[in-house]
């Protein structure tokens, strides 16, 4: 409960910040911008950590958002808006994750079109999800399922496949009969380009961060939890 309240307090500062100096104010120094972006990213990762257990409980118990306590509802809605945000800050590690996954899948013969969630590659063959998992573990020392780099992959999958019904987007996209190796490469290319572009914007203090409202969510509190992406 204490940690959830901490997230709510943060909504008044880093979560609501947009990097655009007031008229007549001197521009922020690059070092100051870097700290702001890093703090926002750290706060988002904490909010995702707090919100996921709430989502899982709501899903498993069949609860609607309105059935949750005020603190759980705020944690869940914050979690969901962060996942839906297409303008989250990135860092060099996000870029490295996508690059390393791309290298693991640099040749068609290394792509596994029927990957398992257990991620046990055979003969150095990886599906998209397992390539991202191994890349994340190499870069971070752990796998962060909702890290910005992974969310950019999910957004790219939606664009390339045109299918929003995937419950587990990366795994189901990779294993779909209609997915080809070229589609996987296109997804990686789109995600890599967006992460690189955002890094460049951040280097110039030019990335405008999405403002969150007081609840961390812009849609109706009566929305179902069922539309949360996987």
Image (tube, rainbow, N blue to C red):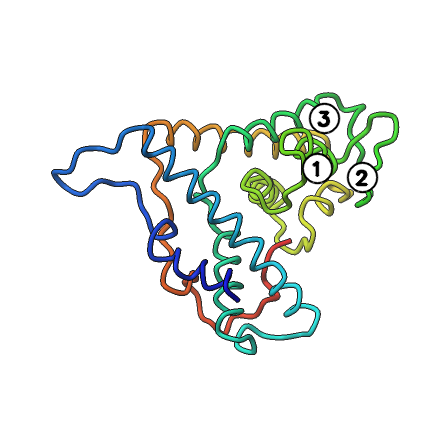
Determine which residue is flagged by label 2.
119
Question: Residue 95 or 128: which is nearer the viewer?
Answer: 95
Seen in the picture, residue 224 relative to 168 is either above or below; the reply is: below
Name the element at disc 3. Answer: loop
Q: CA distance from mark 2 to mark 1?
A: 8 Å
1 vs 3, front mark: 1
Give the camera-side residue of 109 and 146: 146
10 Å neighbourhood of mark 2: few (<14), some, or many (≥20)? some
In the rendered image, the residue lying farthest to the bottom is 67
Secondary element at image label 2: loop
Mark 1 Cα-neighbour bin, 10 Å: few <14, some 14–19, many ≥20? many
Q: Residue furthest right?
A: 122
Q: Which residue is mark 1?
A: 133
**Between marks 2 and 3, how big is the CA–CA gap?**
14 Å
Within 10 Å of the Cα at label 3, are there few (<14), some (14-19), or many (20+) other Cα atoms? many
Badge nearest the viewer, 2 or 3: 2
Image-based side of 123 in relation to 19, left or right: right
140 to 103, vertically: above or below: below
Circles 2 and 1 in contact, beta carbons < 8 Å? yes
Measured as percent of width and height from the top left, residue 177 is found at 78, 43
Q: Which x, y percent locates residue 219?
A: 44, 65
Q: Is residue 211 left or right of residue 135?
A: left
Read off the residue under disc 3. 105
- The residue lying at 36 percent from left, 39 percent from top is 36
Task: Say which quarter of the image contains residue 217.
Answer: bottom left
Q: Which mark is residue 123?
A: none
Is residue 81 positioned above or below 59 on the image? above
**Residue at the (77%, 43%) spot, across then down:** 175
């Amino acid at each position: 409960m204490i940690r959830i309240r901490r997230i709510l307090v943060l909504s008044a500062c880093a979560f609501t910040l947009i990097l655009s100096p007031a008229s007549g104010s001197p521009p922020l120094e690059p070092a100051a911008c870097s700290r702001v972006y890093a703090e926002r990213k750290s706060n988002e990762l904490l909010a995702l950590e707090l919100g996921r257990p709430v989502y899982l409980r709501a899903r498993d118990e069949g609860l609607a958002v309105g059935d949750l306590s005020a603190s759980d509802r705020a944690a869940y809605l914050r979690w969901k808006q962060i996942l839906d945000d297409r303008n989250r800050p990135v860092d060099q590690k996000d870029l490295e994750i996508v690059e390393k996954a791309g290298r693991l899948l640099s040749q068609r013969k290394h792509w596994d079109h029927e990957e398992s969630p257990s991620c046990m590659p055979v003969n150095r063959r990886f599906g998209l999800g397992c390539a991202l998992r191994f890349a994340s573990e190499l870069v971070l020392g752990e796998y962060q399922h909702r890290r910005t780099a992974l969310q950019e992959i999910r957004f790219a999958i939606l664009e390339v496949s045109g299918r929003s019904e995937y419950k587990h987007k990366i795994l189901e996209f990779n294993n779909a009969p209609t997915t080809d190796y070229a589609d996987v490469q296109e997804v990686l290319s789109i995600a890599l380009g967006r992460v690189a572009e955002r890094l460049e914007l951040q280097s110039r203090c030019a990335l405008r961060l999405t403002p969150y409202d007081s609840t961390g969510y812009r849609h109706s509190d009566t929305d179902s939890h069922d539309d949360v992406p996987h």
